[in-house]
Image (cartoon, rainbow, N blue to C red):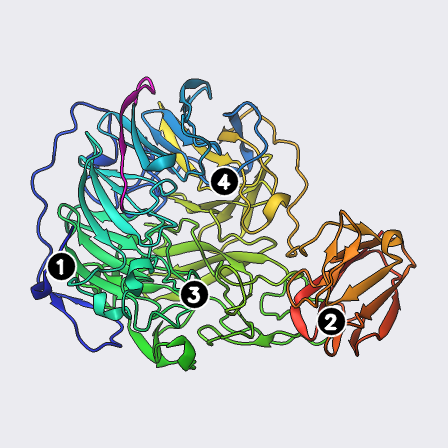
Amino acid sequence: MTHIDRRNVLKGAAATAVATAVGPAVAAPPAVSGGNHPPSSADLARFDTPGDQNFPKVGGNLGNQNYTSLRHIDSGNVRRLRGAWVNRIEGGLATGNSQSTTVAVDGVLYIESALGNVIAVDGATGQTKWRYDQTRGALTRRGVAVGGGYVYTKSNENYVIALDQETGQVAWEHQVNGYGNIEKVAVVYHDGLLFCGTNDGPRGAALALDARTGDVLWHFWGTPGPGEFGNDTWEGDSWAEGGATPWIHPAVDPDLGLTYWTFGNARGNNSSQDGSARGGQNLFANSLVALDLRTGAYRWHFQSIHHDIWDMDNVMSPVLADVRIRGRKRKVVVYGSKSGMFFILDRVDGTAPLGIVERRVPQEPRQKTWPTQPFPVQGPWTEQRVVDQPLGTSVPGDPNRAVPNYVRGALYDPHWETPILSIPGHGGGADWSHLSFSHRTGLVYTGFGYVAAAHSLTESSNGLRPPGEYQTGGIVAVDVSTNQVRWKRRTPYSLAHGNGILTTASDLLFIGQPDGNLLALNARNGHELWRFQTGAAISSSPIMYRVGNKEYLAVYAGGTSIPYGNSAPRGDFLWAFEINGHVAPATTPPPPVIRRPVSGSPVEGAVVGNTVVVGRTYNASTGEIGTAESFAVAGMAPTHLRVPLGTTVTFTNHPGNAGVRGATQFFEGLFDVRLAPGESFRYTFGLRGEYFFNDPGSPRSTGKIEVY
């Protein structure tokens, strides 16, 4: 177990926003030799060495900058960018969750499929060189590491696996138990070490493994145990199941000898929404922690949300940058952000060169909420409060809107049993999409989502994205030297879940969308310059690499379920692009359904007499209406009714319900009625379309009338 040296910690006041390190970082000991091997992340002398021939790790370089020094593809010729080749890496698979970003080393691309298999592909021809098939079942993965002559992947049952880089043969397998689930998080290789995060465990840990054997060299718990610094920020034994898993890959600064880890949300009573039994700030949940890369020793931390009850962990891969702030060159780390704001910290000591303030926030004693929360002085880059939308107005794509009948709130408004609707929701803002920092523009870029969420103890998981709301998003560019928004571009889709960004030395920005389109934008102003249909949703980051004198752009298009469920088109397309390529775009798939779906399958109106019973569930297999009153999402019988144009639909408050229920149609505002038990209301639908409605008595209960 890694023990914290309390002499190296200045505790400060409990509500201090920025932790302060004591003394400089310890230099790393001599590197462990990895043998003769092609250039890889192990050979990067600095965290910010931009990709040129290679793009050797997820994030591009050790600073997770997703930036390339390649410049041949530029604004003048990007319109001539076409497919060089496409490899259906799983033979045409059109299911599963593909969240892996490819890496490129010496002309070979390495990619993990939706099944968790690893495929090596010739970067010039697109031909498969070798493949490794998982032996422990399918597994969602986010990217391999390459170094020391090996390609590193993971499998179910917490195995780390080293594959021979040339052949794909298994060199070793090592099971790593006792620290949480290590199966999903991308691996980072540096100088004989593997850095592995954990996810979905009762208590998470950051790990460093020996890259030659898989042996654990050190670990750092996200929830400190008895006797460790931070344990007193957890009430009683709540730390033991407090979550705080580092479920995204870290950044590494070899010069400072530090790694930077983002730890996830706290949880209690098996819920991220319930803080009633885990009083305190709950370190190191919702924190960026700087650790010695050789020993795992704590150096400093910054907690972005104290005592989180909203599942708003800012667990995006941190980005390192050297920028000039107020005339002084500063080594910074950019941290965030589900909460819709960047925390820009000095990566030596965790101080805030641009200022961070603790502001008082509303309280709920039963939740044991913390009295203050940190905010950058410059403010957020997205809205942090939902507003009411007048009935009778159409708002497709409006970012700052509220599904009616919910109690509306702002970021950090507390909840108990009544759902509080706020924005950004627990899916972002920005979630786990990879940021990009451009050496040319000095801007950091992220894709984000406009998806409000309702938080309460009555939600079974991490909050409710209300059925019927529009799930849209955008791209924002922020000046790292000032933390001010330089530009923002709206998009029809949320870009918060794996839609990573690549920027180039030619001032281009590449990002994929859930509809399968890969876009090129001007990195200085966000104007679109090019798009290409890849055939499946993109939930990964584009990369660039060079083979000989030819430069390529590549992206993996496979798709994932968040936030569009099964409506997001799936595939197994590994694409490479070149100027004047000869491979045409893929067939355009059906676009994702951007409105949050209701809970049930469609039911023909004639089956139920064109009637919706409010406050009851519906069993589609038997046609039976629930015997008990329901206030849940499925509390409409049925939730999805299909009727021909001109049909009159009856809405009835079941006579056995205890009180007033009703139906509010949104966002078109066609009707808004309250019904006593046994009362009915009729409406004739005169236009084709989809019409969502919910119940004033319980806005969770939501239905849809599909008029065809």
| Residue for point 44% across, 46% down | 500
Residues under numbered marks 2 and 3 in contact, where contact means CB atoms less than 8 Å apart: no
Look at the numbered disc 1 and give the secondary structure of its residue.
Answer: loop
Query: For mark 2, what is the residue?
Result: 393
Q: Which one is in front in this view, the residue at disc 1 or the one at disc 2?
A: 1
Residues rendered magenta in the picture: 164-178
Q: Amino acid at mark 3?
A: Ser
Q: Which one is in front in this view, the residue at disc 2 or the one at disc 3?
A: 3
Q: Amino acid at mark 2?
A: Thr
Other residues around mark 4 within 10 Å, as few (<14) / some (14–19) / many (≥20): few
Q: Which one is in front in this view, the residue at disc 4 or the one at disc 1?
A: 1
Q: Position of residue 57 (x, y in %)?
A: 32, 37
* Near-viewer residue (304 or 51): 304
Looking at marks 1 and 3 on the same chain, the residue that comes earlier in the sequence is marked by 1
Name which quarter of the figure residue 129 lies in: top left
Look at the numbered disc 3 and give the secondary structure of its residue.
Answer: loop
Q: Tell whether 464 sits left or right of 198.
A: right
Q: Amino acid at mark 1?
A: Ile
Query: For mark 4, what is the residue?
Result: 76
Name which quarter of the figure residue 628 lies in: bottom right
Whole-angstrom CA distance, mark 1 to mark 3, is 29 Å
Disc marking residue 4 = 1
Whole-angstrom CA distance, mark 4 to mark 1, is 54 Å
Whole-angstrom CA distance, mark 2 to mark 3, is 28 Å
Looking at marks 2 and 3 on the same chain, the residue that comes earlier in the sequence is marked by 3
